[in-house]
Structure formats: C-alpha cells, structure tokens
Amino acid sequence: MRSELDRLMEERGLDALVVAGRAEEANTLYVLGGRAIPGTVYLKKRGQPSVLCHGTMERGEAERTGLRTRNLGLYNWRELVEQAGGNLARARALLFKRVFEDEQVQGRVAFYGEMDQGAAYAFLSELQRVAEGVEVVGEFGRSVLLVARETKDPDEVERIRQVGLATQRVVERVRSYLRSCTVERGTLVKQDGEILRIGDVKRHIRLWLLEEGLEDTGTIFAQGRDSGLPHSRGEADQVVEAGKPIVFDIFPRPVGGGYHFDMTRTWCVGEPAERVRRLYQDVYDCYQMVTEALRPGVRCSDLQKMACEFFEARGHPTVGSDPTAQVGYVHSLGHGLGLDVHEEPRLSDHPGNDAVLQPGSVVTVEPGLYYPEEEAGVRLEDVWAIGADGRATNLCAFPLDLVL
C-alpha cells in the first residue's frame, strides 16, 4: 500500500524515489492515485510529503492531485540545453539536478518509470555525473513500488470491484448473445442468418466494453484446440461450433489506464462431450478446494502445490511433477491483480517465491486443464480479496456454468 512507502524505503536504504514514466504506466498511475497526467515527475523523500513536478500546461491537473507541486516550466529549458551543449540527456540531468537542489534531495535516490533503455541509461549516467551528493539507484525484480502494490487499500479494492461489476455485465451480454444464436449442422448461426465466427463475438466484446468505459487489453475467446492452449486468443475466422469448449478470459481496465479485472469462464453452447464434462468437474472441484484455503499467512507456493497434488490425484499431468508439462495443468494457480493485470504475489511454486497472502492481497485463482490434441481446454478464474478481518471475498459473482 502507498502508506507503506516510507517503511519500504527505509528497509532498502533509500533516501528518495522518483517516478517519471508514461502517464498511463502502472507505477505513475499508482503514485498519482489513478490520475493520468502527462510529463510529470513524482518525487518523494523518505519521511516527507511527496512533490509532483509538472509542465506548465498540466498545472491544473497536477493541483487536483492534492500533492505539493513544482512547475518545471519555470526552469529555463533553452538555457539548460545551451549549457549542455545540445546534449538533451545532459540537459534533462541538469534539470533534475536543479530540482534536487531546490528540494534538498541527497543520498540514495531510486528511479522508476518506463523509458527507452538507451535513453534511460544516457540520462541516468549524466545525472550521476552532475548531481553532487546523489547516488542513482536502480532496483531489479521486487522493487519498492512493486512490493507496495502487492497489497491494496480499501479504495483500490473498491475500484477493482467496480471494474468487475462492469466486466460481468459485458460477460452477461456475451452469454445472451451466444444463447440468441441457433445451431445448424453443428455451427452457431446469428439471427441474420450468417454463421457466427469468433471475430464477430470479439467485435461485440470490444464495443460493449467501451460502452462500460472499459478497454479490451487482449481478450481470450478460444474454442476447440485453441482452448487447450492456455493463452491462445482464438482465431477471428474460426466458426463457433456447438458442444466444443470455449475458454473466455477477459481482463479489461478503464479506458486510458486504471485497475484491471480478470475473470475466465469455460462454456459450451449445447451438450459437450463426456471428456469435457469430466475435465470441467475436475477444474471446478480444484477451484472450490483452493478458494476455501485462502487466508492471511498462507504461502502462495503451497496453494500451487495443493492444485498440483489435486490434479495428479485425478490422473492429470502437472508442472508440479514435470515443470516441462505441455498438457494437463501447465501453469501457476494465479497472480496478483491491480494496475497491471499480472502483479505480485504470484500463486506459483517457482524457486524463491516466499510470498504469503496478507490483508489487502487481491489475487486471481484460475486452475485449468489443457489437452489441445483432444480439442479440450477448461479454465475457471475469479478475483479474490483478503480483507482486514482476514476473510477472503470473491469479487466475481458470475455463475460457474459449463453449458449455455
């Protein structure tokens, strides 16, 4: 949570941190409370209120954040470029040097935000050279911001829940749309008499998401063999067939950036094969078992091990016994969810994963079984939040039905 930044900075020996990235980038949105403001530089000294540096044109939006602000437009950029001999990386470094001097920033300063790797190297190298008393620090892996984002405050959970409600309305429209089709010679036919294809469904999904103020970030709507390939998105020209499993994984966010939702349902329009029914029952039973175990203090790796042991007892290969498995249960159980669709903690048993669930954790739980050569794949996924009272709450109330 943002309230933990000072503690985390102290643990890492950081005197200050800077976030300077794209307006829609997750770390920028995080420190600005979800506001997407171009060209900002967020500066926080340990134990001190944050400062938002901004351009002249963005000063109105910057003021609305409630943070103390500093207008970068009051620094003479032309003069800085001339002083740098036309070297823009050096000019940017001189700008930061002046800001640091005005804000009395010293010591170890960590930098975050997306930037072209070459440009970032050039800028930070120049800054290290010109900024006296400042040590430029980079973090790899679980940075201060990523760790802070692992747990959500009540406002963040509510934002995720609201996106979830809108997402479920879209999913209901998709279900109704499929049900409105007729089946002719094993394929779905639209009310206008045309054969239904996956591309038709996805066009409706994108439109319905926009009507809810959400944007599609890569919806999976995969049938048959593609349903057995976990992240196959589905082929637009493929005809939607009756009785074959459809893996529908949707993970939108508000238009322009914000908190994601993430849910998956597996559907069959009409009666599925008995093999698909058995796979579905195995996935459903695993989902029920694992979600009953969600509580603070549970090791995320243990949840993955529970899923692997359960599926192996039902006769399926898993990555628990064979990390290279290509059929059966072939992925981890879930992941944290927030401003990125995949965040910490990871519900995996990968080496070094010592994460535990804690109050404020928001995670997906998504067991699945995949047999592409049998044209069979099943996955179920919901978003679960661990409350301050330790209770796990499912943020998705959409039915877990197989047959439409």
Image (cartoon, helix red, strand yellow):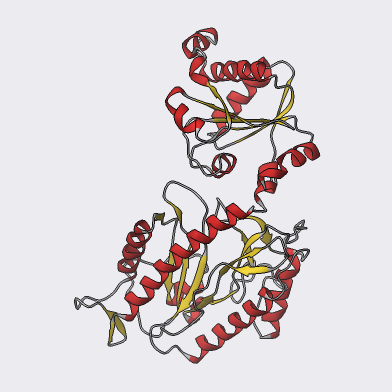
Residue 359 in percent (x, y) is at: 71, 59
The answer to whether residue 45 is left or right of residue 36 is: right
Residue ID at (41%, 50%):
255
Looking at the rendered structure, the number of numbered marks drawn on it comes to 0
Q: Image quarter for residue 324?
A: bottom right
Quarter of the image that includes the C terminus: bottom left
The picture places residue 131, in percent across and down from the top left corner, at 68, 17
Could you tell me which residue is drawn at 47 percent across and 65 percent down? 165
Quarter occupied by residue 157: bottom right
Residue 34 position within the rendered picture, expressed as x and y whole percent measured from the top left? 52, 44
342 shown above or below 370: above
Would you say residue 240 is visible in this rendering? no
- The image position of residue 132, as x and y in percent, is 72, 15
- Residue 298 visible in the snapshot: yes
Q: Up-down: is 104 above or below 64?
A: above
From this viewpoint, which residue is outermost toward the bottom? Answer: 274
Of residues 376 and 16, the one nearer the viewer is 16
Q: Is residue 119 above or below residue 251?
A: above
Q: State the image quarter where residue 294 is shown.
A: bottom right
